[in-house]
Image (tube, helix red, strand yellow):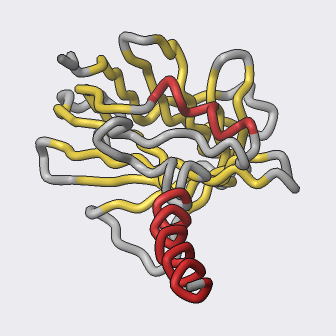
Amino acid sequence: MKIKQITFSIFFLIPLFVFSQYDYEPSKEFPYGRANPEAAQQIKDFEPLLGVCDCKSVNRKPDQSWAEPVDMKWTFKYIMNGKGIQDETLKSDGGHSGSIRQYIADSSRWYVHYYSSNAPTATLGTWEGNKKDGKLVFYREQAAPNGMEGYYRLTFYDISKKGYKWIGEWVDKTEKIVFPTWKITCLREETE
C-alpha cells in the first residue's frame, strides 16, 4: 500500500515541478512573460517596453541626409523564464533584427547582443549600459570615420504607456560631440 502511495505522490509532483519552472515565460495570461523574482531587480528596467509597438525607423543615407521612414513592429518580451529580455523588429523593407538582453549583477550592467537579417555575423555585436535618469543607455566602442575614438550610443527615452523613442548616435569619449545616425519613434498597439 505504501509503495502505491509513494509512486502516486511522485507522479503527481513531477508535473507541478515541470510547470512551475516555466512560470515566468510568455503564456496566454501573460503574453510577454513576467519578471522572475529570483532575477536581479533591474530585470524590470525593460518592463515599460513589453509588448508590441508600431514604429517609424529613420536612418541616414550615405550623403548624411535622412532617408524616408520605414514602418516597423517592435516587440519586447521576457525570456529565460523571466531572467532575460528579447526584442524583435519586423520592418516593412524586409530588414529584421533583434536583441537578447541580460543583466549581469556581478558587473552591475546590462549586456545587449544584437543580430540582424541584413548583416548576419558569426559574432554578435554587444552594447553595455544601464538605466539612467529614466532612460536606458548603452554603449559600444566605435571609431568615427576619421579615426576619432568614441562610442556608438543607443538610448531609449520618452518612455510612457503610449510608447517610447530610441536613438542611435556616435559620440566622442567625452560625449560632447554627438552625431545621430538612426532614430525610431514607437506607439503602443491598441489592445482589446
- Nearer-the-camera pick, 46 or 11: 11
Which residue appears farthest toward the bottom when viewing the image? 3
Q: Residue at x 27, y 63 (%)?
A: 117
Q: Residue at x 78, y 40 (%)?
A: 173
Quick check: 105 left or right of 67? right
Which residue appears farthest toward the right when viewing the image? 106
Q: Residue at x 55, y 73 (%)?
A: 9
Q: Residue at x 63, y 22 (%)?
A: 135
Residue 186: horizontal and vertical position, in percent?
33, 22
Tally of numbered discs: 0
Q: The C terminus lies in which quarter of the figure?
A: top left
Q: The N terminus lies in which quarter of the figure?
A: bottom right
In this rendering, does residue 140 appear at all?
A: yes
- Nearer-the-camera pick, 66 or 140: 140
Q: Is residue 110 depicted above or below 9 in this figure?
A: above
Residue 16: horizontal and vertical position, in percent?
50, 62
In this rendering, does residue 60 appear at all?
A: no
Residue 74: horizontal and vertical position, in percent?
31, 37
- Nearer-the-camera pick, 85 or 54: 85
- Nearer-the-camera pick, 83 or 114: 83
